[in-house]
Amino acid sequence: MSFAEVSKIPGIRIKIDTIIDNCFTVTYNTNVFEFLPCSDGLYYFDITSFENNSTFTNYSFLETVANNKAYFTSTEVKKAGDARALQRDIGWPSTAQFKYYISKQLINNSPITVDDINRAEYIFGPAKPLLEGKMTRVSPQECKIQRIPLPIPILQQHKQLELYVDFFFVNGHPFLTTRSSKVKILTAHMCQSRSKKVINEFASIREYLLPIQLHVYGKDEYVGVIERALRVTNERCRCACHAIPYKYYTKLMLRSLIAVVIRWINAFPSKGSVSSTMSPAMIVEGKNNPGMKNRELGLGPTLWSSSDRIIR
């Protein structure tokens, strides 16, 4: 309850003086309740520290359905349940609309009255399907896509790039990854196979890539650019897996894991790149620096979301 609501209660006195202590006291009759600050910025009252002369020693500020039913007769409780069931059967109109239907007798042969609906609200509280089904965002933020122009010196001086390609595995699933020289942009895509036939297709397309030169490295040859990129990707993936509570990962989760890791690697300037202030994603795709106004969720959390009026 707010200060304004508490102050309206007869016999209540609220006192606060932050110079003396960061708390406020509420005096009612001869009892003094001290509210202390918590880490969330709110104030709370510790009921275990309260002592009075009452014969009651346990307190509960939680309303339960069983306790609420105790204030009504069995017939009133049953009709309150029937009112909630009827609201469900006619497609969950809002409580205000439901009262209107009943008051105007728009439902024939219905024994339910407006009082039954009010008792249902008091006993059971707001209907959960109404809270979940009619939940909407308030004043959604507008998300604007801003493209960053590529500086002319980078465009003129770095037209020729080398693209390094390799395979790596995550839980037995092959991924094709690429890393460019100078710009240092990194990509990764899940593959269906890494069979000998698939690998040999690199050499078979050599003539179709001309005038681009293609060099296929041997199995034991070390290519530092792509190997270092793979090591960073693997380390980031392991860190992400240790930060979430799952023990098993579906193929979709693995694909999303790699996509999230690659996106954040490309979101910041890479060491040895043509620019120390522009990220690979900014140079190649024109993306702006990451912002916290429309912050994306990290890997692993669950949420309720609405897309095209369908709850996901």
Image: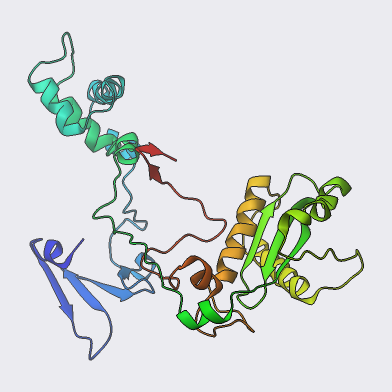
Q: Quadrant of the N terminus?
A: bottom left
Q: Quadrant of the C terminus?
A: top left
Q: Is residue 75 above or below residue 173?
A: above
The structure residue drawn at horizontal position 51% and vertical position 76%, both measured from the top left corner, is 155
Q: Position of residue 203 (x, y in %)?
A: 83, 55
Q: How is the image coloured?
A: rainbow
Total residue callouts: 0
The structure residue drawn at horizontal position 57% and vertical position 56%, both measured from the top left corner, is 300
The structure residue drawn at horizontal position 78% and vertical position 59%, both measured from the top left corner, is 167
Q: Position of residue 302 (x, y in %)?
A: 50, 51
Q: Is residue 111 visible?
A: yes
Determine which quarter of the picture holds residue 229.
bottom right
The structure residue drawn at horizontal position 59% and vertical position 74%, both measured from the top left corner, is 159
Q: Is residue 250 visible?
A: no
- Judging depth in this view, the residue of 47 and 85 nearest the camera is 85
Determine which quarter of the picture holds residue 82.
top left
Q: Position of residue 62 (x, y in %)?
A: 33, 50
- Judging depth in this view, the residue of 114 and 149 nearest the camera is 149
Q: Is residue 138 above or below residue 130?
A: below
Determine which quarter of the picture holds residue 179.
bottom right
Q: Is residue 194 left or right of residue 24?
A: right
Q: Residue furthest right?
A: 220
Q: Is residue 278 above or below residue 96?
A: below
